[in-house]
């Protein structure tokens, strides 16, 4: 669970996301791009031009499992995503 980014190497365009299964989210994005069905048109266009080599897929931060059964993982992910958006200069 954590924060991930997909960056277009050529333009620097960035898709930032949060997921309870960050590795699955990145795999899904690769699959959608490969099928030509990704919602982000800029990333899809770069994939169509350059394939996997045109994009960078990265995990920015992972959330550690807590012993506290009541820990608010959704809230933690939302806060971390906001922090990373601010660091990247992206709109909320």
Image (cartoon, grey):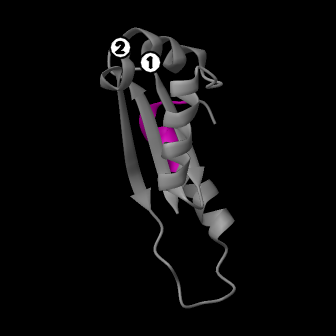
Residue found at x 33% / y 13%: 10
Identify the residue position indicated by label 1 in the image: 47
Residue found at x 38% / y 19%: 51
Q: Left or right: where does residue 53 sit relative to residue 45?
A: left
How far from the left and from the top, in percent, is residue 2? 50, 58
**Dominant secondary-structure state across the stretch colored magenta:** helix
Q: Judge whether residue 65 is colored magenta.
A: no
| Proximity of marks 2 and 1: CB atoms separated by less than 8 Å | yes
How far from the left and from the top, in percent, is residue 4? 47, 46
Residue found at x 39% / y 50%: 60
Q: Which corner quadrant of the image does residue 74 belong to?
A: bottom right
Distance, label 2 to label 1, CA atoms, is 5 Å
In the rendered view, tell whether residue 39 sits above or below residue 17.
above
- Write the start and end of the magenta stretch as one range: 83-90
Residue found at x 44% / y 34%: 6
Identify the residue position indicated by label 2 in the image: 50
In the rendered view, tell whether residue 39 sits above or below residue 80.
above
Q: Nearer the viewer, residue 37 or 80?
A: 37
In the rendered view, tell whether residue 77 sits above or below residue 64.
above
How far from the left and from the top, in percent, is residue 18? 57, 50
Q: Dot 2: few (<14), some (14–19), or many (≥20) neighbours within 10 Å?
A: few
Can I make out residue 82 in this image?
no
């Amino acid at each position: 669970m954590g924060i991930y980014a997909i960056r277009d190497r050529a333009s620097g365009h960035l898709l930032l996301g949060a997921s309870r299964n960050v590795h699955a989210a990145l795999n899904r994005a690769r699959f959608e791009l490969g099928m030509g069905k990704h919602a982000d048109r800029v990333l899809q266009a770069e994939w169509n031009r350059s394939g996997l080599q045109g994009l960078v897929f990265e995990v920015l931060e992972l959330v550690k499992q807590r012993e506290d059964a009541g820990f608010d993982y959704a809230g933690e992910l939302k806060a971390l995503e906001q922090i990373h958006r601010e660091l990247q200069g992206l709109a909320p």
